């Protein structure tokens, strides 16, 4: 039973605490590390969700033989922090995320030492039990939240085997007859072939109050969004969903493809204390963005928060020349603080970074959010298709963009002060008597 929930936990919770075997010190253990005892737990926790049959990664990393075959490549990707895909600077800003899948320095050290020691297999009886992974046929949130209250499908689209990127923008009614608050959403590409071609998707609620309010953004590697208790997004009676699906032909035609959007609702008549919304911050807009050949430009913009806010999540969006992005707070008293920094953006991975409840930045009214986005249009950027090109704003991967999607909860002064006090109480307890809870 426990194992049934493992994949969900691996996605939604802070990973490192879950598997006791993965917290060892490589230096201490040296060449004694074995696959079954020391390495497999790390792979179960941080790699197998994607590296299993039928999932999005190109090869399986489930057994000793599979891992051994890719040892050198694994060493390379892991040491450069390209795998698992998590591209935040580990030394700057907030580091507590609900969906963290990064490796600790110790885990990286263990993998490197183990590869360098010749990848000893060890005793299979030391291995943890295999994880019972979801197949991709169903929503990953179902074991935790039950079946979605609403499943809305895009209209069918024929994805050809070959060709350029395609965008499909159908609009579909939600069928809701009363206003409801959304508790969680998850995008599910069709099974099995849709998973290989569905690259990226924007889901917008078309409704009276928040025309064009983005409900969720999904990209390869993202699972879903669940809001903390008391937090939710409004979906109105009579609303429609505007989909924008980015397909990426991969050699296999997928006729009549449909992507599913699962929506979990709060009970009828429930109004969350903290309605939240995804806000769009355009840092390098159309008409402004202009990247010279062989250059490394940076774009910056600042926005004043008119009321207190809690930042729930963030995601930066660029294409192949995108290199890094940061979000800084300039507080009303003049202090500045880096909230988060992506220092090695990878176009294949539009990670949405969801702050842990206790770490979601609480900002007073008058805080200036300063965004920076930088590009590398030189040969230093291994993802750059043509360093000699002059690049402007556009939809295609060879064009560029530069914006942030931020999950924002607007607060009033009373709520802000209360949340701040609650958080300070928890911090005080943690430094004093560890058994005392908040309040
Ligand atoms: C969220 C999904 C995901 C996770 C988690 C993940 N990978 Fe990957 N991995 C991929 C995908 C997709 C690719 C191919 C595209 C790419 O390289 O980005 C890949 C590529 C790789 C490659 C290069 C394969 C090649 O042929 O070039 C290696 C090596 C690798 N992963 C190892 C790992 C290891 C080791 C872990 C865990 C410590 C891990 N990955 C975790 C999805 C994932």
Image (tube, helix red, strand yellow):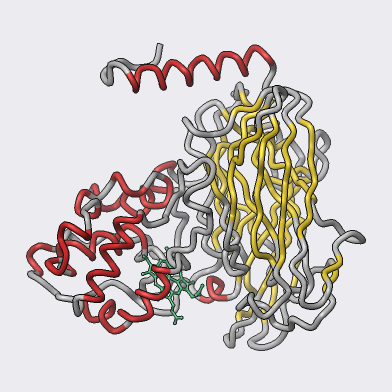
In which quadrant will I find the C terminus?
top left
Give the residue drawn at x 70%, y 22%. Answer: 333
Give the residue drawn at x 68%, y 72%. Answer: 320
Residue 130 x/y as whole percent: 22, 62
- The tally of labels here is 0
377 or 275: which is nearer to us? 377
Give the residue drawn at x 38%, y 71%. Answer: 51
343 or 226: which is nearer to us? 343
In the image, ligand 1 is in what quadrant? bottom left
To which quarter of the image does residue 419 belong? top right
Residue furthest right in the image: 287
**Image height check: is 376 above or below 410?**
below
Residue 93 x/y as whole percent: 54, 42
Residue 127 x/y as whole percent: 14, 63
Residue 116 x/y as whole percent: 24, 76
**Image height check: is 134 above or below 60?**
above
94 or 201: which is nearer to us? 94
To which quarter of the image does residue 7 belong? bottom left
**Image height check: is 361 above or below 188?**
above
Give the residue drawn at x 14%, y 75%. Answer: 121
Image-based side of 386 in relation to 287, left or right = left
118 or 179: which is nearer to us? 118
């Amino acid at each position: 039973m426990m194992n049934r929930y493992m994949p969900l936990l691996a996605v939604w919770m802070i990973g490192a605490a879950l598997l006791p075997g993965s917290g060892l010190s490589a230096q201490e253990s040296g060449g004694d590390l074995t696959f079954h005892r020391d390495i497999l737990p790390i792979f179960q926790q941080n790699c197998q969700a994607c590296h299993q049959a039928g999932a999005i990664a190109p090869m399986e990393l489930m057994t000793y033989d599979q891992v051994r075959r890719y040892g050198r490549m694994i060493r390379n990707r892991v040491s450069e922090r390209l795998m698992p895909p998590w591209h935040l600077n580990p030394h700057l800003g907030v580091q507590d995320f609900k969906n963290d899948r990064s490796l600790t320095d110790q885990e990286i050290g263990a993998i490197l030492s183990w590869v360098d020691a010749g990848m000893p297999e060890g005793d299979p009886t030391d291995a943890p039990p295999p994880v019972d992974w979801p197949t991709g046929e169903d929503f990953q949130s179902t074991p935790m939240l039950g079946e979605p209250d609403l499943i809305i499908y895009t209209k069918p689209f024929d994805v050809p085997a070959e060709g350029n990127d395609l965008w499909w923008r159908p609009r579909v009614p939600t069928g809701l007859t009363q206003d409801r608050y959304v508790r969680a959403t998850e995008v599910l590409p069709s099974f099995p072939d849709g998973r290989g071609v569905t690259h990226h998707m924007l889901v917008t609620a078309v409704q009276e109050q928040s025309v064009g309010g983005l409900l969720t953004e999904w990209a390869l590697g993202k699972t879903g969004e669940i809001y903390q208790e008391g937090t939710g997004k409004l979906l109105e009676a009579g609303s429609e969903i505007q989909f924008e699906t980015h397909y990426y032909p991969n050699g296999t035609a997928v006729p009549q493809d449909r992507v599913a959007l699962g929506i979990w609702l709060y009970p009828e008549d429930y109004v969350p204390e903290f309605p939240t919304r995804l806000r769009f911050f355009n840092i390098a807009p159309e008409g402004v963005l202009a990247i010279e050949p062989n250059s490394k430009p940076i774009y910056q913009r600042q926005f004043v928060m008119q009321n207190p806010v809690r930042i729930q999540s963030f995601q930066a969006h660029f294409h192949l020349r995108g290199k890094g992005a940061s979000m800084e707070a300039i507080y009303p008293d003049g202090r500045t603080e880096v909230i988060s920094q992506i220092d090695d953006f990878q176009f294949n991975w539009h990670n949405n970074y969801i702050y842990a409840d206790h770490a979601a930045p609480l900002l007073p009214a008058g805080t200036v959010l300063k965004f920076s986005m930088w590009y590398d249009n030189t040969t230093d950027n291994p993802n750059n298709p043509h360093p000699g090109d002059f690049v402007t704003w556009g939809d295609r991967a060879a064009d560029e963009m530069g914006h942030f999607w931020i999950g924002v909860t607007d607060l009033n002064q009373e709520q802000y002060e209360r949340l701040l006090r609650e958080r300070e109480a928890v911090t005080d307890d943690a430094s004093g008597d560890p058994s005392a809870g908040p309040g």
